[in-house]
Image (cartoon, helix red, strand yellow):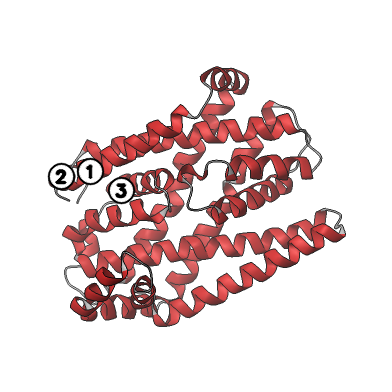
Amino acid sequence: MKSKYQNLFFAFGLLLLLVMAMQLDLKEVWKGLQHAGYWFFAVIALWAFLYVFNVTTWYLIIRSQDEGDSPRPSDKISLPWLYKVTVSGFALNYATPGGLMGGEPYKIMELAPVIGTERASSSVILHTMTHIFSHFWFWLLSVALFLLFEPVSLPMAFVLSCTTLFCLLGIWFFQKGYRSGLANRVMRLLGYIPFVKRWAKKFVEQHKQQLDTIDSQIAALHSQKSRTFVAGVLLELSCRLASALEIYFILRVLSADVSYANCILILAFTSLLANLLFFMPLQLGGREGGFLLSTTGLGLTVSTGAFVALIVRVRELFWTGLGLLLIKISNRKKAGDRFLQ
């Protein structure tokens, strides 16, 4: 990636990160960190492990695209370099209003010089699709978990029914997208949005062949390389389930009597609400509200929910800051010396 674009991503993300940090009460943050003690470092370390799931999924998708090529383009990529790009991509997504507007273009621009623009675009789109697709399965699994372990009132039955319907619709939409591709569809959808529709229509006209190629690569993963597809979804779903450890670690600080299944339910409800408010940078308000509602709904106190939300927010700021810093650590030429095999 050119240095000017790299600097633009870094500066934009850093500005938003500073704005987000200014929303926090530093005294409350310090008290919360003191109370959390070494468990906060366990939470930080956990996410270093969780990103490995995301990197592995993306790497599997990239490898699946160069079957028959010799030499294989993916041989130029090492996992440490891909890990760096992944963490930076998620950092930009956290800080950017609308989520995917920051991280996905960054990942495509970093990867394109190595494996080509079309393959970079399709691999990033596929990874993002798989990441979102796993969320729908995670929420659906959480509905079943709630039915098994928690009493269901009439209002909760309505909420669970709506959640189930929403998840099934999401799964259907992505299954359809996997079969026929999403690149052309997304660009056609942008053609109806004010301010960008003229650009979108012109882009489709000029890049029709490339978009068709990307869509064919997306469809090929689902139809011809089903093992890679299933492995990717299972890895991302495993990441969702393992990330509930974060809530479990934090609740251990408070000696709260909560099972791991409860932690999964707290995470599921919170992530669902936060993703519905995707247009907010760092999902401000939605995530905190989700933690408060989910913890009190399971019989915990409001202060418990507030403490969990605070520690999670500080962890997000830490990894967002680290991800932005990694953008500046090395440009692609230096990455070729350090990370590319």
Horizontally, residue 63 falls left or right of residue 262, namely: left
Q: Give the residue displayed 65% in from the left and 30% down from the top.
A: 307
| Label disc, if present, on residue 85 of the rendered structure | 3
The answer to the question of whether label 2 and label 1 lie on touching residues, with beta carbons closer than 8 A, is: yes
Q: Rounded to the nearest whole Å, what is the CA distance between mark 3 and mark 1?
A: 16 Å
Horizontally, residue 242 falls left or right of residue 321, namely: right
- Which percent across, then down, holds residue 230? 50, 70
Q: Secondary structure at mark 1?
A: helix
Q: Give the residue displayed 17% in from the left and 51% down from the top.
A: 1
Neighbour tally class for label 3: few under 14, some 14-19, many 20 plus, Cα within 10 Å: many
* Quadrant in the picture for residue 40: top right
- Which percent across, then down, holds residue 224? 40, 81
Inspect the image, locate mark 1, and give the three-letter code of the amino acid beneath it: Leu
Inspect the image, locate mark 2, and give the three-letter code of the amino acid beneath it: Lys
Above/below status of 146 relative to 21:
below
Q: Give the residue displayed 65% in from the left and 45% down from the top.
A: 290
Which label's residue is closer to the chain start, 2 or 3?
A: 2
Q: In this orientation, which residue lies closer to the viewer: 231 or 120?
A: 120
- Marks 2 and 3: which is nearer the front? 2
Inspect the image, locate mark 3, and give the three-letter code of the amino acid beneath it: Val
| Label disc, if present, on residue 4 of the rendered structure | 2
Q: In this orientation, which residue lies closer to the viewer: 86 or 238?
A: 86
- Which percent across, then down, holds residue 247? 63, 39
Residue furthest toward the front? Answer: 194
Q: Rounded to the nearest whole Å, what is the CA distance between mark 2 and mark 1?
A: 6 Å
Q: In this orientation, which residue lies closer to the viewer: 298 or 42?
A: 298
| Label disc, if present, on residue 120 of the rendered structure | none
Neighbour tally class for label 1: few under 14, some 14-19, many 20 plus, Cα within 10 Å: few
Residue for badge 1: 8
